[in-house]
Image (cartoon, rainbow, N blue to C red):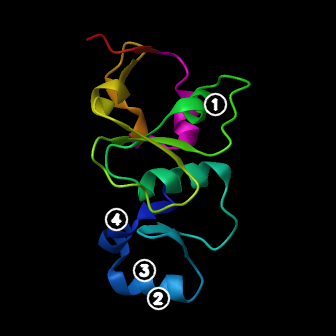
């Protein structure tokens, strides 16, 4: 999602001075440590999930009921966003997440969409993930 960035990504893209200035002036938000939201309006549900992923370690993915709901399954509403982290990763800085750790997260998160190339769903925004409903798990 273009309006939710890790702080390091925002600094690389805009420079530290602009990021600090826009956050301090209230033009941008810092919903949690290490994450910048490039507007000052309300946070949408999709942006909240993007903030959850951005606050987590690289390789993290949405999981459980959250992932099922994004994948188009009806009746799967998570009370709190569920996120899966690589084994040994620190808990995300965003409070209110249901966190799990996995030793096989990278392989489990790679899927084949139709007959196209392998795709890492955690790299997609939640709205893009919803569009990718037809997939089959990667063999192996």
Badge 1: few (under 14), some or many (20 or more) residues near its Cα, within 10 Å? some
Closer to the N terminus: mark 2 or mark 1? 2
Per the image, label 2 sits on a secondary structure element best described as helix
User: Percent from the top left, x then y, of residue 128?
Assistant: 53, 37
> Dot 3 lies on which element?
helix
Residue marked by disc 4: 9
Quarter of the figure with residue 19: bottom left
In-image side of 41 versus 63 (left or right): right
Tell me which numbered mark, 3 or 4, is placed earlier along the sequence.
Answer: 4
Tell me if 91 is positioned left or right of 51 in this view: left
Which residue in the protein does label 2 denote?
Answer: 21
Q: Residue at x 29, y 41 (%)?
A: 87
Residue 105: percent from left, percent from top: 32, 32
Does residue 50 belong to the magenta stretch?
A: no
> Up-down: is 97 above or below 120?
below
Please report whichever mark, 1 or 3, sits nearer to the chain's N-terminal start. Answer: 3
């Amino acid at each position: 999602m273009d309006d939710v960035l890790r702080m390091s990504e925002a600094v690389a893209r805009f420079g530290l001075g602009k990021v600090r200035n826009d956050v301090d002036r209230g033009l941008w938000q810092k919903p949690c440590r290490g994450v910048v939201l490039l507007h000052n309006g309300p946070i949408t549900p999709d942006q909240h999930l993007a903030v959850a992923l951005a606050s987590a370690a690289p390789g993290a993915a949405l999981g459980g009921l959250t992932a099922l709901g994004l994948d188009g399954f009806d009746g799967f509403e998570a009370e709190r966003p569920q996120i899966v982290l690589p084994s040994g990763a620190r808990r995300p800085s965003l409070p209110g997440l249901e966190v799990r750790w996995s030793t096989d997260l990278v392989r489990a998160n790679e899927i084949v969409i139709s007959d196209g190339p392998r795709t890492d769903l955690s790299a997609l925004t939640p709205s893009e993930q919803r569009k990718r409903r037809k997939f089959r798990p990667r063999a192996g």
